[in-house]
Image: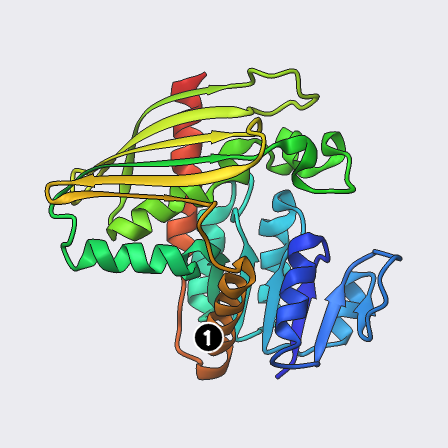
Amino acid sequence: MKLGLIGFGSIGKRHYENLLRHTKNIVVLSKRKDVNLPHQVENWRDFKKSGPYDGIIIANETAKHAATIKKCVALRPRALFVEKPLSHNLKGLNLLERLLRKSRISVFIGYCFHFFGPFLKIKNIIKNGKLGRIYYMRASVGQDLKEWRPGRDYRKIYSAKKNMGGGVMLDLVHDINYPAWLLDDVLIPKRALVRKISDLKINTEDFAESVFIGKRTGVVVSVHQDYLRIPGRRSLEIIGSKGGLLWDSSDTEDRNKMYQREIKFFLNCVKNGKYFSNFEEAMRDIANIEHLKRLGN
């Protein structure tokens, strides 16, 4: 099995290290000079020549995802893994989805919390009806942007730049996505307040409050996201007719286990050849975010 990895930031590096548990045959496309990798190329021409690839992981900047996916389709891998969010806007995504479906290339958008131990337990609790009929769910996430990615100037990373896909709603899209997954439902956006309320040197929103309604279940889902919380923290509250559930990130498992499960899922997509795509789900998240930003500004 031969794999390609495009981008070698913090998440690309994590994926690379987890991939090494399964194969050493990995070609990394990255211009970084401060890493020593056995198979690294610095341009697309050399990456293409180093193929063919069974699977490709796209972990470069969000604003480059759509163009990179299109180039990768021409290389005919069995499957693509695209880091979340899928893109920084909806432009061209419908055409890309049709191209991927026509080519029968599996595509997985990296919603890693679908593989998070505590959330897998919570999903099972909901599925088994232990909370009864769910009334409402509140997801909350906050990160201190200045300290979130140690060793990097927060003003220069994509989080700070609107044209690169920054802002809390896209950057922390997990917390818009996973409530729908837990409920096995589609969320309809209803209300939002989206603002930059701090003195952070960024041109994106640093604060968002959003409200959704479950299309099938009618559950009220509220989501809080910010770049301001010190220390960073994630929490979830669910209230149902038989009781409630509260989780927060102070009580968690080793996060790398989640990423290992995610990589294993992707590699199974590569190996078994069975078609898989959550592209439409990822497009829906971006459409919801764009709609809520229009409502909330």
Please identify the quarter of the rendering in which residue 77 is found.
bottom right
Residue 90 vs 194, above or below: the answer is below
Helix, strand or loop under label 1: helix
Q: Can you see residue 33? A: yes
Coordinates of residue 212 in the picture (x, y in percent): 28, 33
Q: Quadrant of the N terminus?
A: bottom right
Q: Which residue is mark 1?
A: 269
Q: Residue at x 77, y 74 (%)?
A: 49
Q: Height in image: 104 above or below 152?
A: below
Q: Residue at x 55, y 15 (%)?
A: 197
Which residue occupies 11% across, 48% down?
132
| Residue 105 in view (yes/no) | no
Q: x, y percentage for residue 180?
A: 31, 47
Label 1 packing within 10 angstroms: few (<14), some (14-19), many (20+)? many
Q: Nearer the viewer, residue 55 or 13?
A: 13
Q: Is residue 209 left or right of residue 92?
A: left
Q: Nearer the viewer, residue 235 or 63?
A: 235
- The tally of labels here is 1
261 lies above or below 146: below
Residue type, numbered disc 1: Cys
- The residue lying at 51 percent from left, 65 percent from top is 257
Q: Position of residue 284 (x, y in %)?
A: 38, 44
In front of the other: 277 or 200: 200
